[in-house]
Amino acid sequence: MLEWKTLTLSVSAGAQGSTEWAPERDITIRKILVREESGNSLLDVHAKIEISDTPMTRETIPLDLLDAEWNQVPELNYKLPKGVKIKFTVSNDSSAAVALRIVLAYE
């Protein structure tokens, strides 16, 4: 059965910010969805995803790819052991601040 974890992060225009989380048990992240709370575009907003300081993406990814319907977001199998952090470092290259809701679907 899927469980959910929501992380929030606000990043000013032209700035960078990060948020992280460590689960209390071993989990597998199945999907990551991102929503922008204030209605601004995510076209120029990118993220680097790391688990225990190991990059999960070769390059930063545009967050608008994760701002999609459930069946359009890629299926993941990121193993995250108890107490190990997943970290999102977000760069906002747009001209407006963004208020992000990052949702992890996991088992």
Image: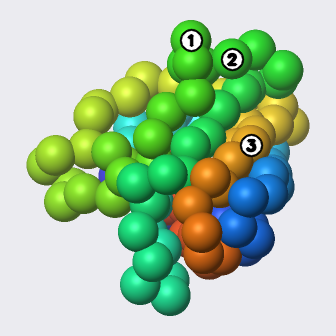
Q: Earlier in the sequence, mark 1 or mark 3?
A: 1
Camera-side residue of 57 and 59: 59
Q: Disc 1 to disc 3, how far (Cα)?
A: 14 Å
Q: Disc 3 to disc 2, how far (Cα)?
A: 11 Å
Q: Which mark is residue 89?
A: 3
Q: Which residue is mark 1?
A: 58
Q: Disc 2 to disc 1, how far (Cα)?
A: 7 Å
Indicate the secondary structure of the residue bearing disc 2.
strand
**Residue at the spot 75% in from the left edge and 71% down from the top edge:** 12
Where is residue 70? Give x, y as percent: 21, 55
Query: Mark 2 or 1, which is nearer the eye?
Result: 1
Category of crowding for the residue at label 1, using alpha-carbon neighbours closer than 10 angstroms: few (below 14), some (14–19), many (at least 20): few
Where is residue 10? Give x, y as percent: 73, 73
Q: Earlier in the sequence, mark 3 or mark 2?
A: 2
> Farthest residue toward the front?
95
- From the viewer's perspective, tell me whether residue 15 is left or right of residue 65: right
Q: Which residue is mark 2?
A: 55
Q: How many marks?
A: 3
Q: For the residue marked with disc 1, what is the amino acid? A: Arg
